[in-house]
Amino acid sequence: QLPEVMRILEQPAGTLWICTTGGLWRLRDGVLEPFGTDEGLPRENTSDVLVDSRGRLWVCAQKLYLSPTAEGRAFRVVPTPGIEVPRAITEDHEGSLWVASSGDGIARLRPTPFLSLFPAGESPLDAARSITLDAEGRLWATIQSRGLVCRERDGRETAYQLGDGPDGDLQ
């Protein structure tokens, strides 16, 4: 039986990557296959997976892992200064990767080393749980202490809380 599922990613050819509390799994052509130490991954909690625009596979599993191909072989740990436990990953229109962490905010990875944009203690953005970028290039994140936060391309931030509006809607 498959462990608790945290995230599912479908590739264009129909392959599913499944992040679970028991590691990363792949469903392809009706075959469910676990990925672990033979591929360079731990057999533990995986919280997110991404195939980037260059065809590389990224996995958040207590550390950030990278496979040079979308096949998921030969993973290596990617250093993430300022990010202790990566939880979620997304890619923007410029090819930069954004990583949300458990307690360390959000960091951006460009072809150069990670740049921490919201280090813990310096910004109200602390325990980031989920991130995505919209078509206009705005970064959306769920932040434990602030709710839903939108960071504009120019750096301005807006936080939305449930229940602030007249009918309990977003405000």
Image (cartoon, rainbow, N blue to C red):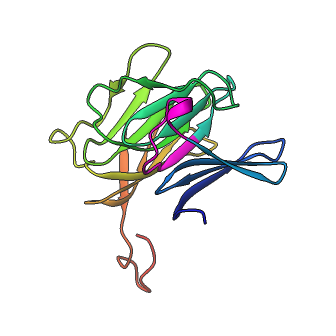
What secondary structure is the stretch in magenta mostly built from? Answer: loop
Residue 77 lies, with reference to residue 59, above or below; the image says above
Residue 154 appears in view: no
Residue 2, position as x, y percentages in the image: 59, 62
Q: In the displayed structure, does residue 138 sit left or right of residue 121?
A: right
Residue 161, position as x, y percentages in the image: 36, 68
Q: Which residue does the image show at 25% across and 60% down from the upper left? A: 145
Residue 7 lies, with reference to residue 56, above or below; the image says below
Q: Nearer the viewer, residue 166 or 78?
A: 78
Q: Which residue does the image show at 36% across and 23% down from the upper left? A: 79
Which region of the structure is painted magenta?
36-49
Residue 46 colored magenta? yes
Residue 31 appears in view: yes
Placement of the N terminus among the 4 image quadrants: bottom right
Q: Which residue does the image show at 46% across and 57% down from the upper left? A: 21
Residue 118 colored magenta? no
